Image (spheres, rainbow, N blue to C red):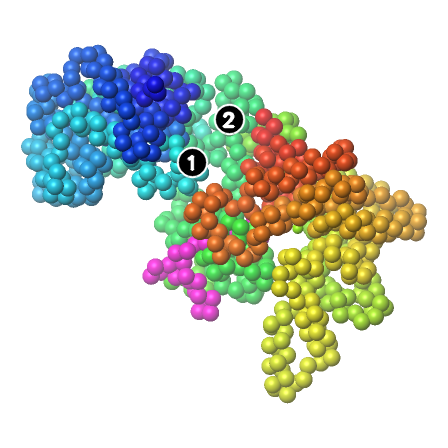
Amino acid sequence: MVRYVYEFTEGGRDMAGLLGGKGANLAEMTRMGLPVPPGFTVTTGACRAFLTTGAEPDGLAREVSVHLTALEQAAGRRLGQPDDPLLLSVRSGARFSMPGMMETILDIGLGDDSVLGLAKTSGNERFAWDSYRRLVQMFGSTVMGVDSAVFEQAMTQLKDLRGAPDDLHLDAGDLAQLVETYKNLIKYETGEDFPQLPAEQLRRAVLAVFESWNGERARLYRRREHIPDDLGTAVNVQTMVFGNLGPDSGSGVAFTRDPATGARGVYGDYLSNAQGEDVVAGIRNTVPLDQLGRLNPEAFAQLRDHMRTLESHYRDLCDIEFTVERGKLWMLQTRVGKRTAEAAFAIAAELVDEDLITPDEGLARVSGDGLARLMFPRFDTAAVGQALAHGIPASPGAAVGAAVFDSAEAVRRAAAGEKVVLVRQETTPDDLPGMIAAQAVLTSRGGKTSHAAVVARGMGKVCVCGAEEITVDSQGRRFTVGDTTVEEGTVISVDGSEGAVYPGAARLVDSAVMRYFETGEASAGLVDAVARAMQQADGVRRLGVRANADTPEDAARARRFGAEGIGLCRTEHMFLGDRRQLVEAMILARTDTERERALDALLPLQRQDFIGILEAMDGLPVTIRLLDPPLHEFLPDRTELAVRLAAAEAHGNPPSAHDSELLDAVNRMHEENPMLGLRGVRLGLVAPGLVVMQVRAIAEAVVDRKRASGDPQAEIMVPLIDTVEELRLVREEVEQVLAEVSTESGVTVECPIGTMIELPRAALTAGRIAQEAQFFSFGTNDLTQTTWGFSRDDVEAAFFSAYLDKGIFKVSPFETIDREGVGRLVEIAVAEGRAARPGLKIGVCGEHGGDPDSVHFFHGAGLDYVSCSPFRVPVARLEAGRAAL
Ligand code: ADP
Ligand code: MG
Ligand code: MG
């Protein structure tokens, strides 16, 4: 037979799956001998059974009644006994903490008779009626479904009538009257009487807590926190203790350390003469916890004692709920407490110092997401006011600037020295100059993998996207939120860590952690704690960490941040700007001579780029990818060009020869589906001279660096391979150029030649490809696109949010690697690649390389390194260390 009920004396903290977190920890505290009011826990299994069948599981009622009887016998009173009632709380508590998301009902057992008994035995009539009105209200709303606002309104009306500033100014008579009003409201709203039978109250309360698992609030919370929907909640039935018995009683919450900074000390709030959630509900002003020391020194000393006991027992920051009943302290809840990123690092370091945890455990307690948050400046939280709007925190950090509504304006103002925030409905590649010029990017549409988000993260630029409350009017150069209008030039503040937008200029606090990574100078406090976590991670990690960098500046920064090379140097950015015309000339060339002339002009420019990057990464590997995007990306937009030429013609200006050629080329190269078109290695195989030029530029750069006594470690990477044949052909060409340059210069140039694995076919034939490839690098962005059949640029706006809402995926596969599908291709390619070529070096480049969860996957899959944007390098180092624990 399944068992549904456990006494607090039977459980323990390792039983959270069965007893819920709250029940497991109540049991743990009971075992430790802390003063916990006695009780028992109904298991999550009972809840699951109830939710699947819709009926109370067989045997539950009998088990509850057995344990209730035991509780009554120990107390010497029966539940709701008229002359001296035992009262109970019925408390939800799931495996993962869902604070305030489900229901708790206090003072179960009171009725019209026993309220008088309670008044007499306690000698406090007001207390008895206060408890009763609380029960009727909680039961009425939670169990009987009456809107709690109805009760609150009645309470407010009575307070107004009495001129009472708060509930303490209502006397026993007022509260008795309130109970009457509440009961009438329940009858009016539900047609049913408030139940007087204690056993019925208990039974219905337990079932209502079960049902609260599927309440709307709880479901939303679980979706956001990625908590499975089928766990169910446990229910804790516990003897009441009373904080509302007068000024020598009260209720409070406490933390064993400051959850904001991690500082040691006593933190929390206390409210005297109060019950339950009063202390967090803001109905009266609470006092800081240390005031309890003056109100009740003995209880306070005990509490501090218990806090120390709990912290060394749990070996972590604990948060605590407690109640003082006539001077006696009772512990009602504890759990390992939530904390800010800053506190997480500080506490881990301190607990290591105190020998409570090992350095490895310290590392397990911090996270890459937390580190990322600490690497950016933030707003002084005390100084910011009400947010103007909220969106998705897409790229962390905080920035202040004047709102501008197009790229050109952003560039113009920034050039004049003004700080700007680029506000768009969504961004496109055309907005790139404006994004570079801006301090922050704010969009009203798009998710975490929208263009704005991806590009901003890559640049380490603050970004809030998908702020749906705002309406962007680019034409009118303003945006509106409700009835607030923000005109161009108005200063706003964007918090990319929290996803908030504030009016005006909020005060910025610099990131000491970022300064540490930039300069390497550790100091005391938070920075020291971070430095120690990094050291620990670097000591245990097996995965290497490289950066994606296209310029000497990015390469140098990546190196300061601890990158062990470049995993992806894209060459396409080197073809933009002034060089676009040279690319255009190459594409339009009609003769070999013309083409060669264009390529010859590009060669020295590319060579110079590579020299700078190889110098910045001297001694470390630099993986250079040959040109990847479709060539037409370097030509004018087809529609725009056609419209411009047609308009000119209408004004009597026929197109020039160059213009018509351009239009021809644009038409010729137009693709319906460029992502799957002429790009990557395909380009190299059909555009004559392109690969030769690129490889020559790389080889000559290597020669140049060697002559300067450098140690260049260039690696040549071929993108978008489908079959080994493609790689074989390109490899021959590459090797020939390397040999030529070696002969010409008298300097031996040897570069490993490898390939990206970014198409399913390549992954599935990795064994054959490895025969020609000296290394692999997974391009997980394209591999995700092609495995799912999603075009990243199109699916975001079209249906991703619907898919997330429906739970088809819990997180976008462009953000965190899809282990089941894309991950399986990775595993196949690793296994077959290494079988064909033992020791084959394998890495990953692309957004996933800096995503904590994905880093753990790549560690498990046996990759040699991950490569990510320079700003994510410390995050990847930390997570690679955590993955190795
Ligand atoms: P939540 O999970 O939302 O924190 P709880 O079950 O902890 O809900 O209940 C909320 C509050 O009710 C507790 O913090 C405590 O103040 C009060 N409470 C719960 N059980 C008891 C009890 N047995 N005696 C007195 N107060 C209680
Ligand atoms: Mg609680
Ligand atoms: Mg790719």
Q: Position of residue 592 (x, y in %)?
A: 84, 67
Identify residue type, mark 1: Ile
In x, y percent, where is residue 380? 44, 43
Q: Residue at x 48, y 35 (%)?
A: 341
Give the secondary structure at mark 2. helix
Residue 727 horizontal side relative to residue 198, left or right: right
The quarter of the image holding the C terminus is top right
Q: Is residue 351 above or below residue 851?
A: above
**318 horizontally vs 605: left or right:** left
Label 1 SS = loop
Q: Position of residue 415 (x, y in %)?
A: 59, 62
Residue where numbered disc 1 is placed: 227
The part of the image, by quadrant, that contains residue 615 is top right
Q: Give the residue drawn at x 32%, y 26%.
A: 46
Looking at this view, is 568 or 577 the one in front? 568
Q: Are marks 1 and 2 in contact (CB under 8 Å)?
A: no
- Residue 531 inside the magenta-drawn segment: no
- Residue in view at x 82 percent, y 60 percent: 689
Question: Which residue is at a point 52% across and 31% down the rendered structure image?
Answer: 366
| Residue 843: x %, y % from top left | 68, 39
Q: Say whether residue 416 is left or right of residue 166.
A: right
Residues in magenta, as a range: 455-484
Residue 522 showing in the rendered view: no
The number of callouts visible is 2
Q: Earlier in the sequence, mark 1 or mark 2?
A: 1
Residue 403 visible, this angle: yes
**In which image quadrant can residue 672 be found?**
bottom right
Q: Which mark is residue 348?
A: 2
Q: Amino acid at mark 2?
A: Ala
175, above or below 320, in the image? below
